[in-house]
Image (spheres, helix red, strand yellow):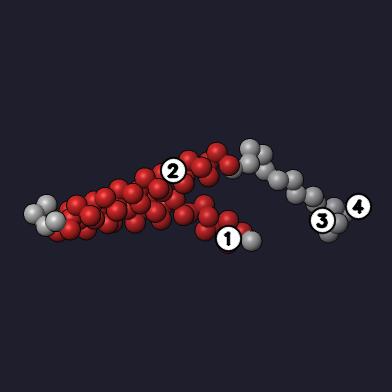
Amino acid sequence: MSKLNDLIERAPMVWLLLGLLIISGGLYLGFDNALSFVYMVVGGFCSVYGIVLFIFLAIEKPRTAPSRPLSREFIKE
């Protein structure tokens, strides 16, 4: 279950990186190409989505750590 949590925590960074890569692809094409503006819009959408997702995850993150009861092997008399 922790792998899924790690994946969910890293999802905003992936979206932001993807958006920046798409924007850089549009810049590589140059502004004389009409398709570069599509790259910019899609890259901007991905970047904004990553930032919004990061904010939502920060708001929804639990404020306290879950309690972890000690096992019987840990407690020895």
Eye-nearest disc, 4 or 1: 1
Numbered disc 2: secondary structure: helix
Give the mark nearer the N terminus: 4 vs 2: 2
Is residue 28 visible from the viewing direction of this image?
A: no
> Of circles 3 and 4, which is in front?
3
Q: Measure the alpha-carbon separation of dots 3 and 4.
A: 13 Å
Closer to viewer: mark 1 or mark 3: 1
Residue 36, position as x, y percentages in the image:
18, 55
Amino acid of disc 1: Leu
Q: Nearer the observer, disc 4 or disc 2?
A: 2
The residue type indicated by label 4 comes to: Glu
Q: Is residue 7 above or below residue 63?
A: below
Dot 2 or dot 1, earlier in sequence: 1
Of tags 2 and 3, which is closer to the observer? 2
SS class, disc 3: loop
Q: Is residue 59 visible to the viewer in this orientation of the structure?
A: yes
Please rate how many residues cluster around mark 3, counting C-alpha atoms within 10 Å: few if below 14, some from 14 to 19, many from 20.
few
User: Mark 4 and 1 residues: CB-CB less than 8 Å, in contact?
Assistant: no
- Amino acid at circle 3: Ser
The residue at which mark 4 appears reads as 77
